[in-house]
Image (cartoon, rainbow, N blue to C red):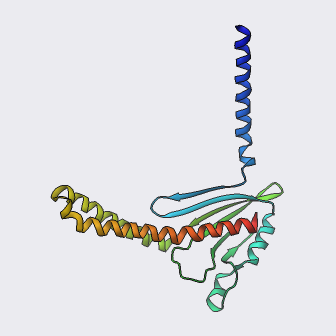
Amino acid sequence: MFEVRKRLKIKKFQSQVCVRTASTSLPHTMPCRNEEIMVLLPSFNDSFPSSKTPEEICSVLQAVTSPPKLRLFQPCNEEFIGKVTPSRFRVVSNISYRNSFLPCIHGSIHPAGNGSEIKIKMRLHPAVAVFCSIWLGFMAFFFLCGLLFAFADGFLQALPLLGPSLGMFTFAQVLIRLGFLIPARKARQRLRELLG
């Protein structure tokens, strides 16, 4: 009986060691990490390793990025528009259509061994984010007022206030997220192809 318990303790200790070893080696084996943040306004975080040095990454990005000033005076064929340095970059995708919800891409480049680690944050333009927050805030306010009317006077009496406010809020959320997430995922995939 004592020998059986001793063997069980040894196996339990070996399994704990394996779990700890796996957990400590996990960050080195995972190739990338991304996170979509969905509260009121969409945003996107991503990080992935690269075999290129920061200087090589800067050269690759500069080859496909046009400075913002040139965009005003002549057509731009590059994939991105913005500024690139060996330590960070701030760009937007160069698209042929109008999209107010196009994500602004903020990236930082960190040396890691023989390569680099790239961290990316995608956000709405600050002016667009303020406008959307005000728009969504008004719709949420009118919807809450409609709920108060529904409790006080009945659902049918509050329907003219509840319906439009809920519809406008839903329409705004769909419009913002589609306008942001579709180009954000395309830009993330393209950046990984270029810099990975």
Q: Name the residue nearer the viewer: 150 or 74.
A: 150
Residue at the extreme right of the image, as rendered: 114
Q: Number of callouts in the render? A: 0
Q: Give the answer, above or below, for where 140 lies relative to 99.
A: above
Q: Name the residue nearer the viewer: 108 or 38.
A: 38
Which residue sits at x=70%, y=7%? 1
Question: Can residue 115 be spotted in the picture?
Answer: yes
Q: Quadrant of the rendered structure where residue 36 is?
A: bottom right
Specify the quadrant that holds the C terminus. Answer: bottom right
Which residue sits at x=74%, y=10%? 3
What x and y, as percent, mark residue 169?
37, 67
Question: Can residue 87 be spotted in the picture?
Answer: no
Which residue sits at x=68%, y=81%? 67
What x and y, as percent, mark residue 178?
51, 69
Q: Give the answer, above or below, for where 72 lies relative to 16.
A: below
| Direction from residue 193 to residue 34 in the image, left or right | left
